[in-house]
Amino acid sequence: MRSLIVLASALLFAACGQAPKGIDCNTYLSSQDSGIQTGGVRMVEISTPKGKFHVWTKRIGNNPRIKVLLLHGGPGGTHEYFECFESFLPKEGIEFIEYDQLESYYSDQPNDSSLWTTEHFVEEVEQVRQALGLNKDNFYLLGHSWGGILAMEYALKYQDNLKGLIISNMVASIPAYEKYNAVLRSKMRKSLVDSLQSYENRGLYKDSVYQALVFSEYYKQHLCRLAEWPDPVNRMFKHLSEGIYVSMQGPSEFKTGGRLLHWDRSADLPKIKVPTLTIGGEFDTMDPRYMEWMSKQVQQGSYTYCPNGSHCDMWDDQAHYFPGLISFIKSVDDGSYKPTSK
């Protein structure tokens, strides 16, 4: 037992030695919980036109200069697939907050479709920001997939509160996403496309055969390319809120038909003035070339390309995803950031 304690201490001090200048191990690991210790978990109260609700958050680390709020995909997903960030950001001294949006598994689920709008979620993020004490001197917002839409919408309204913005694996236009989706589908063998079309024509999106085809022929190629999907990714899909997903996205990755159908902010990207990183994978469901183009439209953009990655390249191309993300955050923090996409 004593040898294990010694080993754990050695590993802890080794990790602390990698923390950014000015952030020591004791500072990063200091508790901000008062009273009962919660491991960083806090249920944040938010106000809506339909009453007050609570959303789940978990703070990992403490860095007064760098606080990254993670916006998950879906809509209706969970923070769970962000758990891999816990293997990379703490040793760099980067504080981050995992967060389940309203209607997601760990947060309140009022099941009120009037709240399933981008406008609601932007205001929800703003309330979470205020509750957690994030501000323009330390607040980085990272949105993945649907969370990328939310991050862009938040930046276009509240970017004066931001220090940095990360748009991960999301384009600025649902029509552009649909167009690229059709390109990916056209590369599938004709017999498979015919089978998918047959189920779709009959509205059988929940049919087990249809779902198995989508998983094996599309998700395994473009959503996460690992041979065995990690437990956090599987848990996220298990906990996905189908109601909000279908209402906002549509019944299938191949059939966008929800409230986001006509969403397009491509013309508004030049209004984003804060340092911005876009991230795209070669095998993504989103066009990686479009995501690189986005980085050239914002005022201070950079792009991280993941040549082995898919939509979840924080899992299947960690060798490129995390160095790009960490380098961006650190350079903005120390004032050395220079846009690379102009």
Image (tube, rainbow, N blue to C red):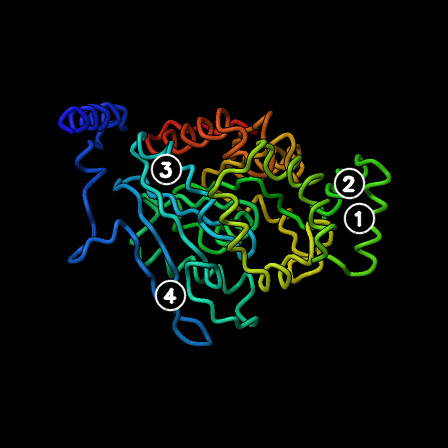
Percent across and percent down for residue 318 are 49, 28
Mark 1 or 3, closer to the camera: 1
Q: Which mark is residue 54?
A: 4
Asked if the residue under mark 2 is in contact with the one under mark 1, i.e. CB atoms within 8 Å, the reply is: yes
Q: Which residue ends up furthest to the left in the rendered image?
A: 2
Of the numbered discs 2 and 4, the one sitting upstream in the chain is 4
Q: For marks 2 and 4, give the CA distance.
A: 40 Å
Give the residue pinned by disc 1. 196
Q: Earlier in the sequence, mark 1 or mark 2?
A: 2
Residue at coordinates 24% horizontally, 25% vertically from top-left?
A: 11
Callout 1 amino acid: Leu
Q: Position of residue 13 (x, y in %)?
A: 20, 25
Estimate the spatial distance between the alpha carbons at disc 1 and disc 2, rounded to whole Å: 10 Å
Is the C-beta separation of discs 3 and 4 under 8 Å?
A: no
Q: CA distance from mark 1 to mark 3?
A: 37 Å
**Badge 3: residue crowd in 10 Å (few <14, some 14–19, many ≥20):** few
Q: The residue under label 3 is which amino acid type?
A: Glu
Q: Earlier in the sequence, mark 2 or mark 3?
A: 3
Residue pointed to by mark 2: 185
Q: Which residue is mark 3?
A: 86
